[in-house]
Amino acid sequence: MKLTTSMAAFAIAFMLSQSAQAHTHHQQQRVARHSTVSRAYAYAPGREYGYGSRPAAWCGWEMRQLVSSDPGPEFNLARNWARWGRPGPVGVGAIVVWSHHVGKIVGKEGGMWVIESGNDDHATRTRPRSISGAIAIRWG
């Protein structure tokens, strides 16, 4: 009986510790994921996100590779593309900038502009997309 009681106590303690560890691990993942995204949006001078190490929020990083001359790591932040090149009208070849996304207009389909961009549903995609809410249209 004493052995059974000891085994039951051990089993309960083991299950409680596993539950606590799982909860702590989940919290650590959520915090790590949040801080990775925050770092990607908040460019820090001297911290190069070069072509070899893509940041978590990477539409600006992808755009750096689509233009003829890399404007630098501060353009990993999508909003910074609003000051790249010169302003101009909407059209094929223009860079369209939203507050948290950037893409290049590559065509028109069914009354919508076709946008090529990175980090669009976690992939580089080319698809028709509304440009409503854009904060800038830029030309290189």
Image: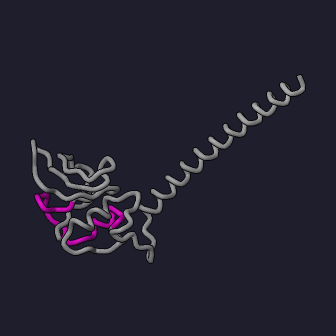
Residue 43 location, quadrant:
bottom left
**Where is residue 77, by image quadrant?**
bottom left
* Image: 86 above or below 13: below
Residue 105 x %, y %:
16, 56
Left or right: where does residue 92 sit relative to residue 16? left
Q: Is residue 118 magenta?
A: no
Which scheme is used to colour this image of the protein? one colour
Q: Is residue 2 above or below residue 113?
A: above
Residue in the image at 20% along x and 55% along y? 116
Locate the C terminus by quadrant. Answer: bottom left
Frontmost residue, 78 versus 124: 124
Against 36, is 46 above or below?
below
Relative image position of residue 121 (x, y in whole percent)? 32, 47
Left or right: residue 55 compared with residue 5? left
Which range of residues does the magenta coloring cover?
A: 76-95
Residue at 21% over, 46% down? 130
Horizontally, residue 62 falls left or right of residue 90, namely right
In depth, the one of 50 and 34 nearer the eye is 50
Which residue is rendered at x = 34% and y = 56% of the image? 100
Res 82 quadrant in image: bottom left
Q: Nearer the viewer, residue 134 or 15?
A: 15
- Vertical arrangement, residue 64 with respect to residue 122, above or below: below
Residue 42, how many percent across, how many down? Answer: 44, 64
Q: Position of residue 120 (x, y in %)?
A: 29, 50
Viewer-proximal residue among 84 and 44:
44
Which residue, as the protein is rendered here, is positioned at the far right?
A: 2
Most extreme residue toward the bottom, as rendered? 46
Q: Residue at x 85, y 30 (%)?
A: 6
